[in-house]
Image (cartoon, helix red, strand yellow):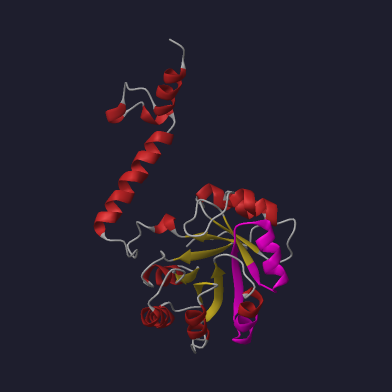
């Protein structure tokens, strides 16, 4: 994985059933692979997936947990996995946050907090989090009203801890986050068509069709002047024509 000097990358697995394959691939590519257990209710499966990630990832990795999932949190923290370096807490900020961060630190790991507002970010910093993740509404799960880039710019001047960006990150926006001062970016849905994704083939096909339609809708007119679309109005032209008074 080609990285900008000083910009970190997190590869986050899809929420739901614990499947470490994408995180393993992320680790092997040089990123921080993170197993997403935010909505997991299968503790045995979650711990098995963590063990698989530890054995196959070949480097340090992380895990994402719901702040309120007390039993799963306790079970994960107690695991003797030296390569488990980062624990990310997600979900609404609550009164247990300080205790969770302290427990993570006692286990010798770093605590990152996923936030959707400035107030949550300030509360996370006060709780002695090692970093916060600015999660925009482009991401899945708990989100707020702002995009990741707008939220990132809101947090950076007010925080002293590193800030990561999560949501809608692509080739160009990753560079923008880097210039703005982000410590790193989170990749999740961007990798749903990767070979290691747990999505079934039918779901992959639907995602691929949606992405193709989206790219066509946003393509410049010059890109549509050859091939099967030659002679047709581009999407922006059709939209403009529809708005003209008759």
Q: In this view, does 41 lie above or below 158?
A: below
Left or right placement of residue 70 versus residue 241 in this view: right
Looking at the rendering, which quadrant does residue 101 occupy? bottom right
Farthest residue toward the front?
A: 95
Left or right placement of residue 126 versus residue 244 in this view: right
Q: Is residue 121 magenta?
A: yes
Looking at the rendering, which quadrant does residue 53 occupy? bottom left
Tag count:
0
Residue 134 drawn at (x, y percent): 60, 58
Q: Does the magenta stretch include residue 113?
A: yes
Farthest residue toward the top?
A: 246
Quarter holding the C terminus is top left
Left or right placement of residue 140 versus residue 108 in this view: left
Q: What stretch is highlighted in magenta?
A: 102-131
Q: Residue visible at 48% across and 82% down?
A: 71
Q: Is residue 119 above or below residue 149?
A: below
Task: Work out whether residue 225 or residue 177 is closer to the camera in this orientation and state it.
Answer: 177
Farthest residue toward the left?
A: 202
Residue 26 drawn at (x, y percent): 44, 68
Residue 59 drawn at (x, y percent): 48, 78
Task: Work out whether residue 230 or residue 87 is closer to the camera in this orientation and state it.
Answer: 87
Left or right placement of residue 231 versus residue 97 in this view: left
């Amino acid at each position: 994985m080609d990285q900008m000097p000083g910009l970190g990358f997190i590869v986050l697995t899809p929420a739901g059933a614990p499947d470490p394959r994408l995180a393993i691939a992320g680790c092997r590519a040089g990123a921080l692979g993170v197993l997403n257990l935010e909505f997991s209710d299968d503790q045995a499966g979650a711990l098995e997936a963590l063990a698989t990630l530890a054995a196959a990832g070949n480097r340090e990795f992380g895990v994402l947990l719901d702040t309120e999932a007390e039993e799963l949190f306790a079970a994960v923290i107690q695991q003797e996995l030296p390569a488990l370096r980062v624990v990310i807490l997600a979900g609404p900020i609550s009164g247990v946050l300080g205790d969770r961060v302290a427990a993570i630190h006692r286990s010798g790991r770093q605590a990152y907090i996923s936030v959707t507002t400035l107030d949550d970010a300030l509360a996370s910093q006060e709780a002695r989090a090692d970093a916060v993740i600015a999660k925009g509404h482009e991401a899945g799960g708990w989100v707020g009203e702002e995009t990741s880039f707008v939220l990132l710019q809101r947090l950076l001047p007010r925080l002293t801890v590193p800030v990561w960006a999560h949501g809608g990150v692509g080739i160009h926006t990753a560079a923008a986050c880097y210039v703005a001062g982000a410590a790193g970016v989170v990749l999740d849905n961007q990798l749903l068509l990767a070979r290691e994704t747990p999505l079934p083939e039918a779901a992959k096909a639907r995602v691929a069709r949606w992405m193709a339609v989206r790219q066509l809708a946003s393509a410049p007119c010059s890109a549509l002047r050859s091939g099967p679309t030659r002679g047709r109005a581009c999407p922006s032209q059709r939209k403009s024509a529809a708005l003209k008074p008759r």
